[in-house]
Every structure is written in structure tokens, then in C-alpha cells.
Amino acid sequence: MPVTFMDLLLWNLQPPPGRKSWHGGPSPVGALRGVSAAQAAWHATPRRKSIWELALHIAYWKYTVRRHLETSDRPRFPRRPSNFPDQPKPADAAAWSRDVGLLREEHERLVAAVRTLASGRLDAIPPEGRRWTYGELVLGIAAHDAYHTGQIQLLKRLWQERSLLGRGMRRG
């Protein structure tokens, strides 16, 4: 079966059921399965982002790319500041569940918007855009997902080994 560029874009955003992303890792939403609010809120060092902050950042950029793809009314992103929204206070399980839901919703809405994008528009620059085409935006958000999902996976491992790290011990 011939594969179109649009098929490849969609596959990179949302692999078919039973298939993993090309890099072998999970999607951003998949990477958050089993992550507790405490784990999500933890900072490996004071100047680094938490899993929670990365999840909200990923949701924001999915929202932003979708804004360029859709012509309908677009409400504002529900969290502030937009690019790296603050963790809520309290950073509890209920708030974490809501923010994971926000990421899941923005992912689903983005995939739906890409599915309706006419392949003939892939080389066009959105009216409010400056330099990137629709195709570049979709490819870019898939790469953005992979990059930050890798950070989330690393933070999950650091969380598991934080007591060893704090004592200067090494594993293996």
C-alpha cells in the first residue's frame, strides 16, 4: 500500500494501535502512565523543569500548532504562563489528573485537525504564520513530542534513582 506524506505525519503523531513510535518509546501521554503527582512535581535540580511542567509545555505547543491548522474559533490555552505553565498549587493527584487530561485532549484535538488538513496545504504557510508551512508545523510538533518525551523518560528514571544520586552512589 502506498504511503503518503500525510500518512507519515499522522503516524509520527499517533502510531497505529499496537505500534510504537519510530524511536521505540511511548507518546507523551503514554510516558505519563503510572506517574504520580509527587513524581510529576519533582525537580531533579532547582533550575530544571519537572515532568508536570514538561507535560503542560507539550500540551501548549500541541494547542499552538492546532490553532494554525483550524479555522474555527479558538479559545485561549487554559493555563498560564502559556509556554511553560506553572504547576498548580496544590500540586495534588486531582490537579495532576486534570493536567494529564488536558494533554490527552490537546493531543486528540491536534490529531483530528491534522486528519482534516488537505494534503495540498502542506506546502502553504498559515495566514498568521511567518515562515513554516503546515507540513513543517506538523512534523515539528511530532519531533517536539519525541524530544520532551525523552526528557520525561529520563526524569522518571532519575526519580527512581534519586536516593542513590543523593548519596553519590552508582548503580551497576
Image (cartoon, rainbow, N blue to C red):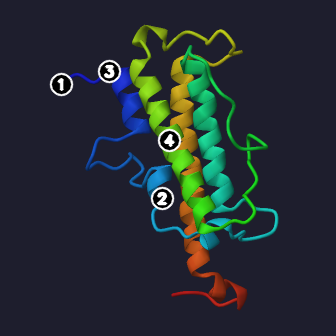
Q: Residue at x 79, y 43 (%)?
A: 81
Q: Please state which amino acid type lies under the numbered disc 1.
A: Met
> Could you tell me residue 132's position as x and y percent?
63, 19
* Residue 71 appears left or right of 111: right
Real-space Cα separation, disc 1 to disc 2, in angstroms: 31 Å
Q: Which is nearer the eye, 103 or 170? A: 103
Outermost residue to the left? 1
Residue identifier under label 4: 105
Q: CA distance from mark 4 to mark 2?
A: 15 Å
Q: Amino acid type of disc 4?
A: Glu
Three-letter amino acid code at the position of disc 2: Ala
How many C-alpha atoms fall within 10 Å of the one at disc 1: few (<14), some, or many (≥20)? few
Q: Residue 113 in the image: x percent, y percent?
A: 46, 24
Identify whether 16 is placed above or below 114. below
Q: Nearer the viewer, mark 4 or mark 2?
A: 4
Q: Which residue is mark 2?
A: 31
Residue position for label 1: 1
**Residue drawn where x is 57% and y is 36% of the image:** 62
Q: Earlier in the sequence, mark 1 or mark 4?
A: 1
Q: Which residue is mark 3?
A: 4
Residue 13: image location, x then y, percent: 44, 37
SS type, badge 2: helix
